Amino acid sequence: MASLFLVNDSNQPESKTFYNDSKLPSLPVPSVKQTIEKYLDSCEAVLTADEYEKTVKTCQLFMQNDAPYLQEKLLERATNHRNWLEQWWSDKVYLESRTSLLVSNFSGPGTYLEHYWPLQEGTQLERCAFGTYLFMQFWQLVRKEVLAAHSTSDGKYLTMHQFRYMFNTCRIPHKGRDKLHHSFRTEREGSSPTHTIVSYRGYLFKIECVDSKSGDIFTPPQFYKAFQYIRNLCESRAEGPALPALTSLDRDKWAEARDHLIEINPSNLEALREIESSLMFTAMDDTSLRNYTELAYAGMVGDPALLWYDKSYNSVTSLNGATWCNCDHTPYDAMVMVAMVEFFTYSIKKLKGVWPESLETDQFVKPIEINFYLDKKAQNSITEAKQHIYRMRQNLELLQIVFYKFGKSEMKKYKIHPDFMVQICLQLAYMQVHGKPGPTYETAITRQYYHGRTETCRTCTPEAVAFCKEMIACDSEIDAKSCRNLISLLQAAQSKFLSLMADCMNNHGCDRHLLGLLLISVENGLEVPKLFTDPAFSASGGNGNFVLSTSCVGYFHGQGGVAPMVEDGYGFFYRINDGRLIYTVSAYNSSSETSAQKMSDHFEYSMSTVYDLLKLSSRMSKM
C-alpha cells in the first residue's frame, strides 16, 4: 500500500481522494461456522485440553440454539447498513467507554530526528512553525482531494474516509455516551474552520492558519512570529491553569466538569467550542527530551497542560526541537498518521530540514488568547486531573527501542514474512517470560470495504504455540534434526499466520462477527448466549482481554505506542525497516506479572535465536 502519492489529474472527478469510497463493496458478514472455527482455533492455543473440550460443547450449543436467529438479524442489519459494524464500533467500543483516554489514545514521537531534525537546542519555534505549515499543507491535500486513494498490491481501492477525521474533530464528553464533533469539509463540500489552538505554560491561544482574503496558508515565517508572540507574552507569567488536563479524567467525570465550566460563565462554552472545532491542538513544551523513550512517555502521559486528549490530533514541540503527537482513536486508525508522517518526512528531507527563506517578517496575525472563568470547584477538578496523569505516568513502564541487528531485508532473504517474524518472536518471548501462551491482538485493516476499519487477527495460533514450545525445549542447543523439525514448525506457523491475516483483511476473522452477534442479542432483549460468558471467551482475548495488544505500523517512518489492554498485559507497536526494527513496549508497574524491560530483553533474544535458526537452516540446505 502506498502511503503518499498525489492524483495524476486533479480535474478528473474519479481521481479525487474520496471518489471511490461510495463505490466500495459493503462490509461482509462471515458465516457462523467459519467464525466459530477461527474462535475455537484461538481457544485451542491457550486452553487446557479439558477447558477446550468444554468450550467446543459451548460453541456447538451456540450454533444450534442461538446463532441461527442472531445471524439472521445481523444479515438483516447488513442489508440496511453498507457497513453493519460502523455505528456500533463508534458507539460501543469508543463513545460509550467511560475510561480515561490516557489508556485508549495512540501516540508517538516525530521520527524526523533520524534525519534533518536532530535534537538541537533553540529550534523549538522554527520547527513548531514549520510543522504547523506542513500540517496545513497536508490539510490542503485532503481538502482539495488531491491525495491519491490508497490501494492494495492487486489494485483494489481502499477507503479514505478516515482521513477526514484528522482535522476539526473532537470527542465531546457526555454522561453515558460521548459525541463526536466534526466540522471538516472538502472544498466542494463547503467551508471549514481554519484555526489551531496553541498551549504554552498553561495558557491557550487561537492562531488563524489561512489568510481570510487570499485563502492561502500562512507561511512558516508568519507562524514563527505567532509562536514567538505567545512565548514572549507568557514567559514572564506565572504558570497557567492547565485546563487541558481535564480531558484526561474518566469520561463521566470530565462530562461533569465540562458542564460545570459552562454553568460558571457562558463564555466558557464559546472557548470550548473554539478548541473543539479547531484543526488541531498544538503545544510548546518547556523541556528538552533526550531519546525516543522520553518522547514516548511525553506523548502518552506528559505535561497535563499540553494535550487535549479529546482532539483527533495533538502535536507538541520541545525546546530542543523534538516533536510528538497524541491522537484520539475514536474516529481513525494509525494508518492516517503513517501517511501524514510520510508527507512530513518527504517535505523535511526535500528542504533539508530548514525553511529556505528568512523567518523574519512583520506580517502575521496576532494570536487571540482564550480565557476561561474558573471557580474553586473547577480548579479542584484540574488538580484532580493533574494527579490522575501523574499517577498514570508512575504506573506506566514504557520503552521505545531500536533493534539494529537486522530488519526487513534479512528476513526476506530467508523467506520469512517480516510481520510474522515479529509476531512469532513476540509470542516466544511471552512464553519464555510467563511460561504460557499469550492471547494476541494484531490489527488487520478492512479498508477495502465501505468505511472499513479493522479486524482482530488472533496471532496466537496452535501452530505458533507448537513452534515456541519446541524452541524453548531446545534451549538453543539445535542440531541438524531439531533444526529441520523447528523449521517445519516455523513454516506451518507462518502459513497459518498469512492465511489468517488474509482472512481478517477480508473481514473473515472472528472478533467483529462475534461482537455483532452479541450486540444483536442485547438490542433484541435476549439473554446473552453462554458463549460470551464462558471463561474461555475472556481467556482467549474476548471482551478486550488480549494480553498482547500489538500492531505493525508499517514499513515506513511512523512509530507509535499504546497502553496495555489489560492490567497484566503489554502494548507492543512496531515498524519494520530494511536494516532495523523500532518498537514500543508498555506494561503497568502495578502488575507483579509483567515487565516491559524483561519482555523487551526476551523479545530481542528471541529475534536473535530465530534468526540464527534461519541462518543454520540455510547453511544446511547448501551442504
Image (cartoon, grey):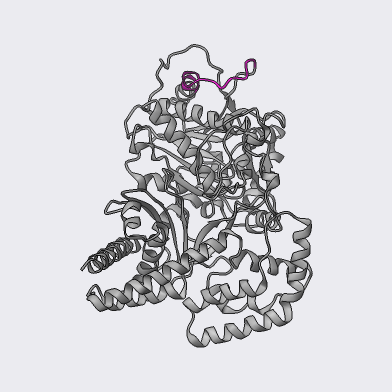
Foreground pick, 499 / 436: 499
Whether residue 413 is visible: yes
Q: Is residue 618 left or right of residue 129?
A: left
**Total numbered badges shown on the rendered structure:** 0
Residue 216 is one of the magenta-drawn residues: yes
Identify which residue is drawn at 53% across, 28% down: 137
Whether residue 16 is visible: no
Q: Which region of the structure is painted magenta?
A: 213-226
Q: Is residue 484 left or right of residue 57?
A: left
The residue furthest front is: 623
Q: Position of residue 558 (x, y in %)?
A: 44, 44
Identify which residue is drawn at 50% across, 63% down: 441
Q: Is residue 267 above or below residue 174?
A: above
Q: Position of residue 190 (x, y in %)?
A: 72, 29
The residue furthest top is: 362
Identify which residue is drawn at 69% across, 38% down: 264
Q: Is residue 79 above or below residue 203?
A: below
In terms of image quadrants, where is residue 366? top right
Quadrant of the frame with the C terminus? bottom left
